[in-house]
Structure formats: structure tokens, C-alpha cells
Image (spheres, grey):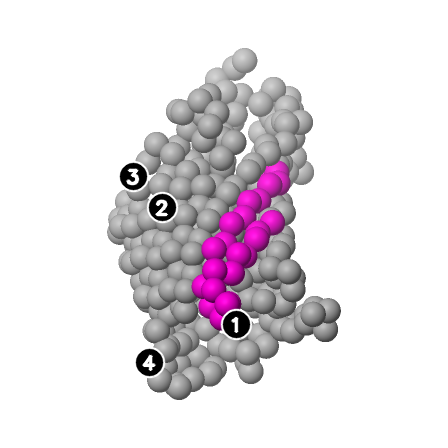
């Protein structure tokens, strides 16, 4: 294999690793306040008899050619018998590479009091991810073995698990994503995926027109420094809410949301570059739409 072929192959692999690592160090900001199901399958279907649909578009590092872009979609619902079901799909692209992820989730919400304001939530997700290379945009030697065999690689299967406890606005949770990869000792040298997520938050109703939701989260990344997230969401009387987060990797997140009659919500968020990327790339912009369909299935009671 000549030098040029080797360089081309290495560039593809490095770009894929950068994209995956960035997604884990800076996951979707909506997972902290807007769509916690993204971080923990046990939170699929948190609202009784309510279908919630989320869609999002995410753009990273626009100053960088071929910068990462993400399109995401989730849906979750809780049946009258306290079973939560969820679907999580996202497609991440960077340069010539696209990674598609698809997960199905099952959760069970166990009431711990007669008033049904205290619950134990347990759940898991299973699905796959697939990496693809766009040959039509390739500039280089298409006969390179790394290029030829890339799209033929096997599908990667994943299993996530989680648990949570909630009482009157207080929620504490723990999730273990990528269980199959974490338990496989062959992946000990990899450093691009999360291994645990823990969080605690408390929604405090200050008045009829103001609710404050402080949150503390702790994330573990394989072979990387753990990340602490500290933030707060402030919900004014409809339709506006704002949020702010500090991340221990020296980045900050700011968000604003517009809620229309508790039916749909428009969310815009911005995450500043981490300390190591400041001056080299701009931050991450994320926009999402959230739809609520309440009271589904109540006639079956």
C-alpha cells in the first residue's frame, strides 16, 4: 500500500473518532431539561397516558469544513398500566461519514404510594448503530482497502439500562449506556463512549407564574475525564422558559424555549466550545420541536 492510500485511510478513521468523541463530550443539551429520555431509558413515558414526540437538528463547529451535523427524533408513551415505550433515532454526519443509530426502549413505572406521586422507574433500550461512507463525494483512491470495506462493516448492537426515583418534582437517576461495550474487555483502549450517567433535580413551584428546576449531573466517559454538569431551568408563566448549564470540560450552554398552550414547544440552545477548541471552532447550535398528545388511552381505564 502506498503512502497516499495510507494517509487517506487514516484520515477517515480519525474523522470518525473525532465525531463520535464530540457527541459524547457534548451530547444533546435537551437531555438535561427538555428530553431526559435521551439520557435514561427508564424515563421513557414519564407522563401518564401522554405521547411526546421530539425532533431536533444540531450543527457543530461550522468553521470546520465537513463539520458534524445531527438529525434526531424520539417518541415515548406511557400506557394506562404504567408501561413506558420509547423510540430513539438519530443520524450523525461529518464529512463523508454518516452514523445512524436506532433504539427501542421499554420502561416500567412502579407506584410507591396510593397518591401516585412517588414512583420507581426502571427501563432498558436496545438497538444498533451503523457507519456509512459516501463514495459519491470521495476525493482520493477508491481502491483503498479501507475505503472498499468500510460500508461492509458489521452493525454494532447496543444495550442501555437505567433506573430512577421520583417524588413530587424530585428525581434522582442512574443510567448505564453501552452496557455491552463496557462489559467487553476488548474495548478497554477506546475512549469515545459514555459508561454511566447520574443526575438529580428538583422542580420547585415558586408561584403560579414561576418554576425553578436546578439540576446536577455526572457523566463518565470511557478512558476520559468524568464530566460534571450544573444547571438550572426557569419556567415563567407560559410561553417562555430559559436554561443555563456549566460543564466541567470548560464549556457553557444556554437555552430558550417557547411553549404554545402546552401543545408544542420550540427549543433553541447554544453550547460554547470546550477550552481546547476555543479559537479553533465555534460552538454547537441546536434547535428542536416538541409535541405533546395528552390523555391517550385514558378511555381504557
**Would residue 162 be visible to someone looking at this image?**
yes
Read off the residue under disc 2.
Answer: 219
Of labels 2 and 4, earlier in sequence is 4
Magenta run includes residue 239? no
Question: Does residue 237 sit above or below 180 in this rendering?
Answer: below
| CB within 8 Å, label 2 to label 3 | no
Precedes in sequence: disc 3 or disc 4? 4
Q: Is residue 292 left or right of residue 117?
A: right
Q: Which residue is mark 4?
A: 206
The label number, if any, that marks residue 225 in the structure image: 3
Which callout, 2 or 3, points at the residue further toward the start of the chain?
2
42 or 215: nearer the viewer? 42
Q: Residue at x 47, y 64 (%)?
A: 113
Is the residue marked by circle 2 packed among few (<14), some (14-19), or many (20+) residues within 10 Å?
some
Which region is colored magenta? Answer: 106-129
Sequence-first disc among 3 and 1: 3
| Image position of 257 (left or right of 229) | right
Taking 7 as reference, is 249 above or below it?
Answer: below
**Residue 266 screen position, x and y as percent:** 52, 72
Q: Position of residue 10 (x, y in %)?
A: 48, 26
Q: Which mark is residue 266?
A: 1
Give the Cα distance between marks 2 and 3.
9 Å
**Secondary structure type for disc 3:** loop
Marks 1 and 2, the one that precedes in the sequence:
2
Disc 1 from disc 4: Cα separation: 24 Å
Amino acid at each position: 500500500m502506498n503512502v497516499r492510500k495510507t494517509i487517506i485511510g487514516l484520515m477517515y478513521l480519525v474523522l470518525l473518532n473525532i465525531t463520535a468523541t464530540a457527541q459524547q463530550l457534548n451530547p444533546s443539551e435537551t437531555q438535561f431539561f427538555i428530553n431526559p429520555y435521551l439520557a435514561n431509558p427508564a424515563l421513557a413515558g414519564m407522563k401518564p397516558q401522554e405521547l411526546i414526540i421530539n425532533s431536533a437538528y444540531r450543527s457543530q463547529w461550522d468553521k470546520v469544513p465537513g463539520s458534524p451535523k445531527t438529525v434526531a427524533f424520539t417518541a415515548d408513551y406511557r400506557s394506562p398500566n404504567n408501561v413506558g415505550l420509547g423510540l430513539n433515532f438519530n443520524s450523525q454526519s461529518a464529512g463523508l461519514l454518516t452514523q445512524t443509530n436506532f433504539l427501542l426502549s421499554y420502561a416500567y413505572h412502579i407506584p410507591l404510594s396510593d397518591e401516585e406521586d412517588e414512583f420507581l422507574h426502571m427501563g432498558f433500550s436496545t438497538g444498533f448503530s451503523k457507519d456509512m461512507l459516501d463514495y459519491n463525494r470521495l476525493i482520493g483512491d477508491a481502491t483503498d482497502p479501507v475505503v472498499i470495506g468500510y460500508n461492509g462493516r458489521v452493525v454494532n448492537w447496543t444495550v442501555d439500562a437505567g433506573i430512577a426515583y421520583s417524588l413530587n418534582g424530585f428525581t434522582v437517576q442512574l443510567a448505564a449506556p453501552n452496557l455491552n461495550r463496557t462489559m467487553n474487555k476488548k474495548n478497554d483502549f477506546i475512549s469515545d463512549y459514555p459508561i454511566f450517567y447520574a443526575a438529580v433535580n428538583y422542580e420547585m413551584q415558586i408561584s403560579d407564574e414561576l418554576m425553578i428546576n436546578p439540576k446536577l449531573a455526572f457523566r463518565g466517559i470511557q478512558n476520559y475525564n468524568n464530566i460534571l454538569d450544573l444547571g438550572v431551568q426557569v419556567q415563567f408563566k407560559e410561553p417562555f422558559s430559559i436554561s443555563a448549564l456549566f460543564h466541567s470540560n470548560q464549556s457553557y450552554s444556554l437555552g430558550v424555549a417557547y411553549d404554545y398552550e402546552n401543545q408544542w414547544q420550540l427549543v433553541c440552545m447554544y453550547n460554547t466550545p470546550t477550552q481546547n477548541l476555543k479559537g479553533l471552532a465555534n460552538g454547537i447550535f441546536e434547535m428542536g420541536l416538541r409535541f405533546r398528545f395528552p390523555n391517550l388511552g385514558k378511555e381504557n381505564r
